[in-house]
């Protein structure tokens, strides 16, 4: 009888002590590593590039090409995913796999995701530390400049005749702008990805433009090349040369590394103040 109890305890400890995690987005992958559980990730996706060791982990596909067969081969104890692919999540659940989904669109949901995954992985103290880092970084950007209209452009192109993607009012970029006591130059109640043209940008007349260009070096485009046509626009940001580029990959990934983006954003505000 004692032997049976010891066996049950042994398998229970192994069940709860060792996770086999699959992360299905770069954001979730980064959060798991930041919590200190990266060693338990047995598979992730093609765009999970940070930290460096993520690249060597088994890949189960990309954003829209996740292989259920590869997921099964990895034998996960838990799958952590964002909530944007309902069909994929439904198919995973049909396989009777343990899958949890999360939102990471705004700062509140990013912090909630960090906290919830921290509880799942028994990393609650580290999760509190990461969310506190976000709160502290937000405090550091208050009142550097005030009431500026700031436009954040996503994956900008040199050719302004093509469609232009900008940050809407439901994303963490908007939260960061508001936390600094400034305002998003783009205003809409729509939850869809905002697409604008040059005429719309001229009408918005932003005071500051921040372009997120994480893959600019791969495209062999310099900062000056990208800014050139934007500086010719009849808007305040161009006239005062307040057009900036953030070329780091973390700029577009809603994970705990949002603090890195906030630091870059702070540097931009300080530069604007000093001009």
Image (spheres, grey):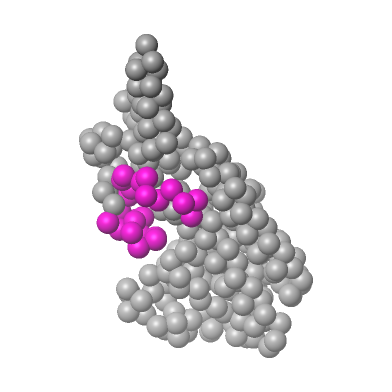
Residue 118 at x, y percent in the picture: 54, 43
Residue 88 at x, y percent in the picture: 36, 35
Residue 235 visible in the current orientation: no
Residue 163 visible in the current orientation: yes
Residue drawn at x 52%, y 40% is 122
Residue 189: in magenta span: no
Q: Nearer the viewer, residue 211 or 214?
A: 214
Question: Which quadrant is home to the C terminus?
Answer: bottom right
Outermost front residue: 2
Outermost bottom residue: 275
Q: Nearer the viewer, residue 105 or 135?
A: 135
Answer with the quarter of the image where residue 147 lies: bottom right
Residue 214 at x, y percent in the picture: 42, 69
Q: Nearer the viewer, residue 213 or 248?
A: 248
The vertical placement of 184 against 210, above or below, is above
The vertical placement of 155 against 1, above or below, is below
Q: How many marks?
A: 0
Residue 46: in magenta span: yes
The vertical placement of 206 against 34, above or below, is below
Residue drawn at x 33%, y 48% is 44
Relative to residue 215, is residue 31 drawn left or right?
right
Question: Which quadrant is home to the N terminus?
Answer: top left
Answer with the quarter of the image where residue 40 lies: top left
Residue drawn at x 36%, y 46% is 41
Residue drawn at x 37%, y 27% is 10
Q: Nearer the viewer, residue 115 or 221?
A: 115
Residue 268 at x, y percent in the picture: 61, 77
Q: Which residues are magenta?
A: 34-56
């Amino acid at each position: 009888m004692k032997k049976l109890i010891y066996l049950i305890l042994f398998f229970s400890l192994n069940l709860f002590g060792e996770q086999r995690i699959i992360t299905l987005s770069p954001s979730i992958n980064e959060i798991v590593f930041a919590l200190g559980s990266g060693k338990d990730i047995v598979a992730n996706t093609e765009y999970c590039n940070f930290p460096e060791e993520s690249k060597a982990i088994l890949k189960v596909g990309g954003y829209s090409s996740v292989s259920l067969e590869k997921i099964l081969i990895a034998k996960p104890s838990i799958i952590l995913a964002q909530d944007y692919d309902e069909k994929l999540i439904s198919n995973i659940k049909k396989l009777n796999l343990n899958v949890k989904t999360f939102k990471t669109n705004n700062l509140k949901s990013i912090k909630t995701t960090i906290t919830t995954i921290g509880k799942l992985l028994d990393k609650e103290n580290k999760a509190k530390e990461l969310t506190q880092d976000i709160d502290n970084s937000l405090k550091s950007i208050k009142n550097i400049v005030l009431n500026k209209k700031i436009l954040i452009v996503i994956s900008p192109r040199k050719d302004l005749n093509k469609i232009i993607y900008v940050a809407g009012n439901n994303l963490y970029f908007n939260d960061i702008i508001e936390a600094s006591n400034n305002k998003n130059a783009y205003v809409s109640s729509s939850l869809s990805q905002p697409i604008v043209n040059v005429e719309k940008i001229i009408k918005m007349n932003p005071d500051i433009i921040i372009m997120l260009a994480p893959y600019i070096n791969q495209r062999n485009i310099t900062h000056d090349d990208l800014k050139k046509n934007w500086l010719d626009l009849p808007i305040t940001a161009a006239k005062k040369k307040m057009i900036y580029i953030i070329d780091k990959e973390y700029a577009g990934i809603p994970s705990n590394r949002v603090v890195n983006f906030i630091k870059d954003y702070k540097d931009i505000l300080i530069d604007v103040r000093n001009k």
